[in-house]
Image: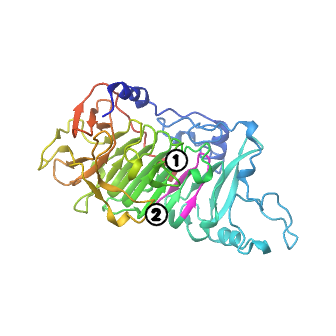
């Protein structure tokens, strides 16, 4: 268990959601001014970070001494030189744009452009190129698959807003590279996608992901059999209607669950809607996971997620030195109990035995492998078992497993109930030593 001195650091972090302002270049070239030129600044929630000139959260100010940035451009198609037919070639972001590289045929680019769309430069002021925005053929419903694999991501801000009916699927190696990227989509499946990783050097890499545009009152799921790896930096991920999927906020070596990214920092994930059989891995830093359990229209027997403050296997399980917080969006009056059966309207918290229970179906995949009960850590830490049953019995999470989290928060208001999790004794002890974390608003503005 972390000491109260360490926990005191959370007090300063609890209210740091920030407020937006008019960072002019990012506003002009990203989302605050609509394509028709109408100022749309009020669409950004007031409790979000302040945008910067070149980033969604102000983390990158686009300092001119780093420009021009060659890594924003493809190694071959970067200057508009004449092609084989004498026509100017397009200026493109990094990618595999030739089917036959020796022929410089641009066949892959033509496939991308005719099935998905094109890219426009993001410019700070009149001339500082700092990233790319995807311009879909059907902006509200981009199908980012197939030829999308040819795009390799740049070192700047890559904005992939696929629309309220957009889909991202059938990827095994998608990577947006460095920079404060923005990824927005409705549905995904058969997906292993990176918005950043050490494989692409990981500079300026605070990413924003909104997955699951639109609610499903029928209890169905939109984000399925998918893993999104956000890698280094301080990332924000919002996911709605997720099943059999994972959010990796900071695993290292391109997302291996037994490794933590050395450049990861405090991250946020917000889970809404129907949420079933999912995993969250925080990596390094002071991470926050917010789960709106009562959103569920439960159609499965159990919900059964797994939350890891660090990684999901091996050395990454117990080596995170951050203060990680699990926020359950329930009534602050929800009692915490330690015995079963769980009385409706209460939350169970207790220890596992300290045995190792492997998730065997994922054992062969180093980017998905995790433990259900994670054995005993070097200081005697064990995985905690939690279970929540709603007052009317319509939601029963079944056992869900929490490894290497230090704070439990029940409620999303200033009066939320705060507990220190002792993963040696298997207890949750009320505390007044930290402030409540107030989750930011759901990013509806990104899906509209």
Tell me the quarter of the image containing the N terminus.
top left
**Image quadrant in which you'd find residue 303:** bottom left
Q: Is residue 311 visible?
A: no
**Colour mapping:** rainbow
Q: Which mark is residue 150?
A: none
Local SS, label 2: strand
In depth, the one of 340 and 56 nearer the eye is: 340
Q: Residue at the right extreme?
A: 86
**Residue receiving disc 1:** 208
Q: Residue at the front extreme?
A: 378
Q: Is residue 23 left or right of residue 435?
A: right
Q: Is residue 432 left or right of residue 57?
A: left
Q: Residue at x 68, y 71 (%)?
A: 108
For residue 266, above or below residue 116: above
User: Which span is picked out in magenta?
Assistant: 173-189
In depth, the one of 334 and 120 nearer the eye is: 334
Work out how far the residue at label 1 is from the one at label 2, CA to CA, in angstroms: 16 Å
Q: Residue 332 colored magenta?
A: no
Local SS, label 1: strand
**Tags 1 and 2 touching, CB below 8 Å:** no
User: Which badge, 1 or 2, is on the more N-terminal residue?
Assistant: 2
User: Residue 180: x percent and y percent?
Assistant: 59, 45
User: Residue 143: x percent and y percent?
Assistant: 54, 67
For residue 209, above or below residue 110: above
In depth, the one of 147 and 262 nearer the eye is: 262
Q: Across the whole image, how many numbered discs are drawn on residues?
A: 2
**Residue receiving disc 2:** 188
**Image quadrant in which you'd find residue 276:** bottom left
Q: Residue at x 65, y 41 (%)?
A: 54
Label 1 Cα crowd, 10 Å radius (few <14 / some 14-19 / many 20+):
many
User: Residue 102: x percent and y percent?
Assistant: 78, 73
Q: Residue at x 14, y 48 (%)?
A: 342
């Amino acid at each position: 268990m972390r000491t109260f001195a360490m926990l005191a650091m959370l007090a300063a972090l609890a209210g740091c959601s920030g407020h937006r302002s008019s960072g002019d270049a990012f506003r002009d070239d990203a989302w605050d001014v609509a394509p028709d030129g109408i100022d749309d600044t009020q669409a950004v929630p007031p409790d979000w970070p302040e945008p910067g000139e070149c980033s969604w959260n102000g983390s990158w100010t686009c300092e001119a001494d780093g420009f021009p940035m060659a890594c924003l451009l493809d190694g071959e198609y970067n200057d508009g030189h004449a092609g084989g037919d004498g026509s100017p070639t397009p200026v493109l972001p990094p990618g595999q744009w030739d089917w036959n590289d020796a022929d410089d045929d641009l066949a892959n680019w033509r496939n991308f452009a005719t099935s998905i769309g094109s890219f426009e430069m993001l410019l700070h002021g009149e001339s500082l190129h700092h990233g790319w925005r995807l311009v879909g053929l059907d902006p509200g419903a981009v199908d980012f698959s197939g030829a999308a694999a040819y795009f390799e991501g740049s070192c700047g801000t890559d904005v992939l807003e696929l629309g309220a009916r957009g889909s991202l699927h059938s990827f095994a190696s998608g990577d947006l590279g460095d920079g404060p990227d923005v990824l927005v989509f409705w549905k995904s499946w058969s997906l292993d996608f990176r918005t950043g990783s050490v494989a692409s050097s990981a500079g300026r890499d605070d990413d924003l992901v909104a997955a699951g545009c639109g609610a499903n009152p029928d209890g169905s799921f939109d984000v399925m059999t998918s893993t999104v790896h956000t890698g280094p930096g301080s990332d924000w991920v919002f996911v709605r209607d997720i099943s059999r999927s994972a959010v990796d906020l900071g695993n290292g070596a391109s997302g291996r669950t037994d490794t933590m990214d050395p450049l990861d920092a405090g991250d946020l994930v917000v889970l809404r809607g129907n949420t079933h059989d999912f995993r969250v891995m925080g990596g390094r830093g002071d991470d926050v996971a917010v789960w709106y359990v009562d959103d569920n229209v439960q159609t499965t027997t159990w919900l059964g997620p797994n939350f890891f403050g660090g990684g999901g296997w091996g050395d990454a399980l117990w080596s995170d030195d951050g203060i990680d917080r699990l926020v359950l969006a329930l009534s602050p009056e929800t009692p915490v109990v330690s015995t079963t059966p769980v009385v409706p309207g209460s939350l169970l918290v207790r220890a596992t035995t300290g045995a190792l229970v492997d998730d065997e179906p994922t054992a062969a995949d180093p980017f998905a492998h995790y433990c259900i009960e994670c054995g005993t850590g070097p200081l005697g830490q064990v995985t905690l078992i939690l279970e929540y049953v709603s007052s009317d019995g319509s939601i029963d999470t079944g056992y869900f497993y929490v490894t290497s989290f230090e704070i439990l928060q029940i409620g999303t208001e200033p009066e939320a109930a705060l507990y220190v999790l002792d993963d040696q004794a298997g207890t949750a002890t009320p505390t007044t030593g930290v402030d409540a974390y107030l989750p930011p608003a759901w990013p509806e503005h990104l899906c509209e």
